[in-house]
Image (cartoon, grey):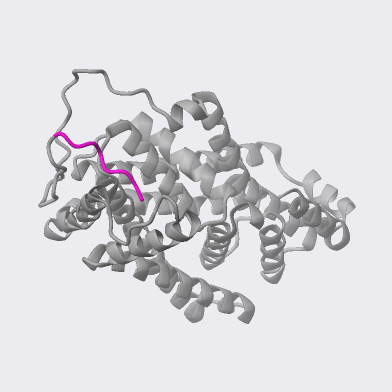
Amino acid sequence: MFIGLAVFIAYLYFFAGFKNIAVVLKGVNPTQYSFYYVLAIGTVILGNFFWLLSWRNVLHKLNVNISVKNAFLYYWTGYFVDLVVPCETVCGELVRLYLVHKETDDDYGIVAAGGITNRIIAYIIVVTGLFSSLSLLFLKTSVPPIITSFLVLIIIGATAYLAILMYLALSPKSSERIAAIGLRILRILRPGKYRSNDFSPETKRSLAAFYSGFKTFREKPRYLIKPFVYLTVSWLFNLSQFILVFFALGLQGLPFAFFIVVYFIAGSVTDLTASFSVGTLDILLATIFILYGLDPALSGITAILVRSVTFWFPLIFGFIIVQVYGAKRLLAPEPKEKGKPQANHTPTGPVTPAAPGTNAPQPL
């Protein structure tokens, strides 16, 4: 991360020039800048808030109930992990899976089905937006070939990712196959503990609950309407972050297709590389801005502001939440009171509940 920052600073020094950057900064209206930049920060929080509302609503349909406060904490904890560890949002989902299970004691399979269902809806919106945006670019604007090629690669990657998620949701055997691969890996890493070729009874119940959770939404697709609305609003807020940053610098004459290009490129590279995008993505964004006619100094400043809103603010905000609330408390929530009646965790639909008197299934 620090190496990336050093490389970007060197880029600004040699290609933009600190004197030219200082001249550009003097021409920025401080009132206009403050107003739009604060709005941009606000859209980050609102965009993520509507995302977690969708996730919470999906879980609720499976009778996995968490408060808005805890959904907020769990979401930002997972988001912080996603920004630090380059694992294409998988690590963040695993963190949320663990935290929700620790609080509710619901089956891992049910919670995982909720998280993947929410992710499928989000990627349907993203892929639809990508194809629509690329069509708009071809029809109405003159886009450098390198940018078009980059967007095509992003579309291929996003479509492949969506196809994998759909496979998990629609194929009864998909979860078993993936779990079998995981079991083989565990047998290699820890042969003394994982000797059997078969799944434990707890794992089998989790796999059954995992598939049954998806079955709930297939049988009652109306349950997906509200999450779809929430995620669409979240997508619009996330897109507006980039527009507001440019408005903050007084750049209000750029075509809408330009913001689409920047949004998808920045989001895709950040999801894929996380903290390793520092420096590399900043230079890429500055180069794209130059291709669209901005001078190098203004392009460098704009890239800095875009990244401060879309990467550094969420990273710092997530870190503060983890520190203030307490990492230990997040990772080990307080146990439920003894004697407190347990809620019925059977989701709306034909999910197979755990046998009476058994503990919650544990992961492999």
Residue 70, image x, y percentages: 37, 31
| Residue range corresponding to the magenta coloring | 357-364
254 or 217: which is nearer to us?
217
Residue 91 lies in the magenta stretch: no
Q: Residue at x 28, y 63 (%)?
A: 176
Q: Is residue 361 one of those drawn in magenta?
A: yes
Q: Position of residue 135 (x, y in %)?
A: 44, 77
Q: Is residue 73 left or right of residue 304?
A: left
Residue at 75% in and 56% down: 300
- The residue lying toward the viewer, choosing from 196 and 308, is 196
Q: Which residue appears at 84% of the width and 56% of the height?
A: 10
**Residue 69 x/y as whole percent:** 37, 29
- Residue 124 visible from this viewpoint: no
- Depicted 201 relative to depicted 342: above or below: below
- Residue 171 is left or right of residue 255, and the answer is left
Q: Residue at x 82, y 59 (%)?
A: 11
Viewer-proximal residue among 238 and 67: 67
